[in-house]
Image (cartoon, helix red, strand yellow):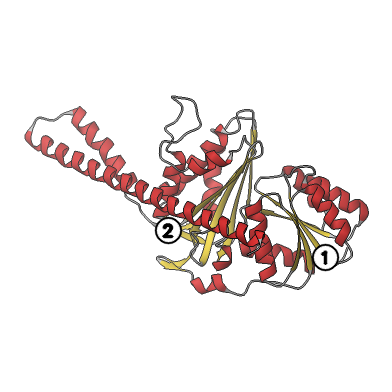
Amino acid sequence: MTAEDAAAQLARERALKQAEKMETIGRLTGAIAQQFNELLTAILTRAAALAQSGPPSRDLDALKETAQRGAEQALRKLQPLVLTEFVRDALDAVRRGLPAGIDVQFEADEDAGVIEADPAAVKQILLHLVTNARDAMPRGGTLHVEVRRARLGAADRPLHAWVEPGSYVSVALSDTGVGMDARTLARVFEPFFTTKPVGVGTGLGMSMAYGLVKQHRGYLHLYSEVGQGTTVKVYFPAVRARGVPEAAAEADEPLPGGTETILLVEDDQTMRLAAQQLLSKVGYRVVTAVDGQNGLDAYRAHRAALNLVITDVVMPKLSGFDLYQAIRGESRGVRVLFMSGFPAPNFRKTVGQDPRVAFVTKPWTASELLAQVRQLLEAPHA
């Protein structure tokens, strides 16, 4: 077994361990919700009995009304939602409660798809995630929200160990806040865990959001880097009609591939191995580099054979943007695909105007990454 094989095996084991932990948290939050509903039912039953046996009471009526509202929120009322429209409307309301220093950006596929969900629960998920993003940007920043169609299959398991093949609609929220280290990321979904000062919040935001997503048969994936920000992607199963999921077979359609040579520059070992294995599996020849400077050296060594450069944005020694500028100074024709978990507004304003450049958001799915690769490789020469 090579060192890369051993690293890939370790990454898979970590992913499976995290998936098992997330399932446990999902069951726990589901059990809490069920117990909460049972308590509310008991309160309502007892209040009704007291109302029958005693004189009218405004306090008792108020108690019944409050408990009834709680019970209605606990009971999920599933209905078809056009997620792009729903998120756009929800963000319009959320913007008014955010500090002036936070710029909210929205991008979406207008035909991203329909999900079956409880509107109140989806709004609550968004509120939890937006609140966390706001708190991570005390000095202001950018909150970028995307709604996209996503196709998940077996090829996504190196990064998404929980995946069930199928068609999904994803909502990605990316902030430019303080980010989280590996230790915090490992605990962020634990009930009552918080990085906020004593007396600020309950520590239930992410665990409750995860529990609500699981109740909709969906998944939640988080990517973060210290000092750069955080991206949370929520996946809801897409439906054709009420209660009828889109065919899982669609998720196992052949993934697009090719025989071109690609330089992959990524400092995160897990992401690098996953991308390398995916690209190799569909036929590409892959040269890897572990940081920006290493990537520039590899580009110069292999430039005659390279058809595409895939690079992370935030890396040690040389950033992805700096690597791009260096490559463009030596060759105008090479295509570049940037990968980042963050909004990267500078990308859209500068290098994003280059027709030989594209951008994919981490954590990407196999179909997202490979579709961008083929689109760049097949684009006509400028």
Quadrant containing the C terminus is bottom right
Q: Secondary structure at mark 2?
A: loop
Would you call the spot at circle 1 few (<14 residues within 10 Å), some (14-19), or many (20 or more)?
some
Residue 136 in the image: state x and y as whole percent.
58, 34
User: Is residue 250 positioned above or below 63 on the image?
Assistant: below
Q: Residue furthest left?
A: 53
Q: Are marks 1 and 2 in contact (CB under 8 Å)?
A: no
Q: Is residue 110 visible?
A: no
Question: For this rendering, which residue is in front, 46 or 59?
Answer: 46
- Position of residue 359 relative to residue 37, above or below, is below
The residue lying at 52 percent from left, 44 percent from top is 90
- Could you say which disc has been placed on residue 81 in the image? none
Quarter of the figure that contains the N terminus: bottom right
Q: Residues within 10 Å of mark 2 (few under 14, many from 20)?
A: some
Residue 172: where, in percent of width, then height?
A: 58, 50
Q: Residue furthest front?
A: 1
Image x and y of residue 53, in percent:
7, 35
Q: Secondary structure at mark 1?
A: loop
1 or 2: tag closer to the N-terminus: 2
Residue drawn at (57%, 63%) of the image: 156
Query: Tag count in the figure?
Result: 2
Q: Amino acid at mark 1?
A: Asn
Q: Which residue is at 41% across, 53% downward?
A: 23
Residue 275 visible somewhere in the drawing: yes
The amino acid type, in three-letter code, at marker 2 is: Arg
Mark 1 lies on residue = 307
Image coords of residue 325 (percent x, y): 86, 48
Q: Which residue is mark 2?
A: 217
Residue depicted at x 44% and y 35%: 203
Q: Is residue 92 above or below residue 289?
A: above
Q: Nearer the viewer, residue 247 or 283?
A: 283
Q: Is residue 359 left or right of residue 130?
A: right
